[in-house]
Amino acid sequence: MKDYLLISNTKENKISNFYLDLVSSHIQKSTNEQVHCRELSSRKAYEWGLASNKYDPKLEKIMSDFQSNYGIDCNFIKTTEKRKKKLLIADMDSTIIKEESLDELARQIGKEKEVSFITNEAMNGRIEFKKALEDRVAILKGNSTDILENLKKNININHGARELVKTMNMNGSITVLVSGGFTFLTEYLKELLGFKYTHANTLQIIQKEFQKFEITGKVEGPILDKKAKLEYLNKYVKKYNLNYKDTICVGDGANDIEMIKHAGLGVSYYGKSALKKEADLHFNNTSLLGLLYAQGYTDSDIIK
């Protein structure tokens, strides 16, 4: 059985032969083995197969320095018999989409500064998520639901999200969007991107006169926090009779910690410091295509 060293950068076509030779040289010096790389995406992603237990602290330090010096993500992937995962659970805000949805709603009503501060504190684990959510939603009280429709029209899908969901769906995997955000947006993304299941919080909305709808400033039902995200991971593992090694979870903040800790591959996507120390893989220069490369998919396997 092999483990893998993956290097990637999808921002630029920058991984030249210079970098490939440098990594190969580091591996050979550290392991006393000559290992050839496999191209996953031209000038963007490559991997080296290593015998188990060959990725020692010395090589880890070398690759950490390489990452810092050259802006190329370096990840070590311990594999089981099958690299391709059967269950994907993804966060929404700042992961599948570029934006923090509550911050963008607040921007429309001139309250972005107050809301984004709370969001940042919560994502870094300095404020309990439940309180942070309730405080931010309260700021939206009295506003028309038009701001929800405006947000749908203006969100940006992060690069690689469509390909990630499509490719895993076509390979028989279960794809799930689990968010501390809201159902009005997760359901929209389910239709747009093809997630099989979505779970999120529900904004309380009331009907006013003249068929107008208004946000009450409250959340309906139990709040979907980091504990709930783990419960959904557990639910789908049981529902589809999977092993946790068959799962991959991705997110960016403290609310994602529990599901990422328990996944077969837990991925920090441009993650906050609270999450980074818990994740198996870290992508700071790579799009969501990195989740496919980490499973051994090449560009020719990826469905556009």
Image: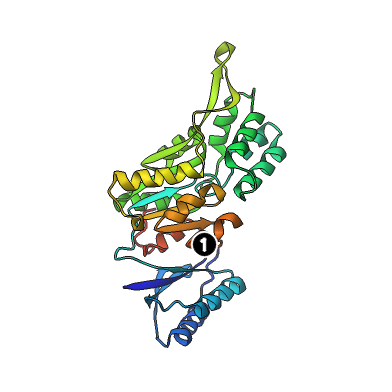
Q: Mark 1: give few (<14), some (14-19) or many (20+) Cα within 10 Å.
A: many
Residue at position x 57%, y 39% from top? 154
275 lies left or right of 142? left
Residue at position x 39%, y 53% from top? 304
Please tell me which residue lies in front, 298 or 117: 117
Q: Look at the image and tell me whether residue 63 can be seen.
A: yes
Please tell me which residue lies in front, 112 or 147: 112
Q: Look at the image and tell me whether residue 272 can be seen.
A: no
Please tell me which residue lies in front, 138 or 198: 138
Q: Is residue 287 above or below residue 45?
A: above
Residue 243 rendering spot, x and y as whole percentages:
31, 55
Residue 34 rendering spot, x and y as whole percentages:
40, 86
Q: In the rendered structure, which amino acid carries the disc numbered 1?
A: His
Residue at position x 41%, y 37% from top? 191
Residue 42 rendering spot, x and y as whole percentages:
44, 69
Q: Is residue 275 above or below residue 204?
A: below
163 lies left or right of 201? left
Residue 203 rendering spot, x and y as whole percentages:
54, 28
Image quadrant holding the N terminus, namely: bottom left
Please tell me which residue lies in front, 292 or 39: 292
| Applied colour scheme | rainbow
SS of the residue under disc 1? strand
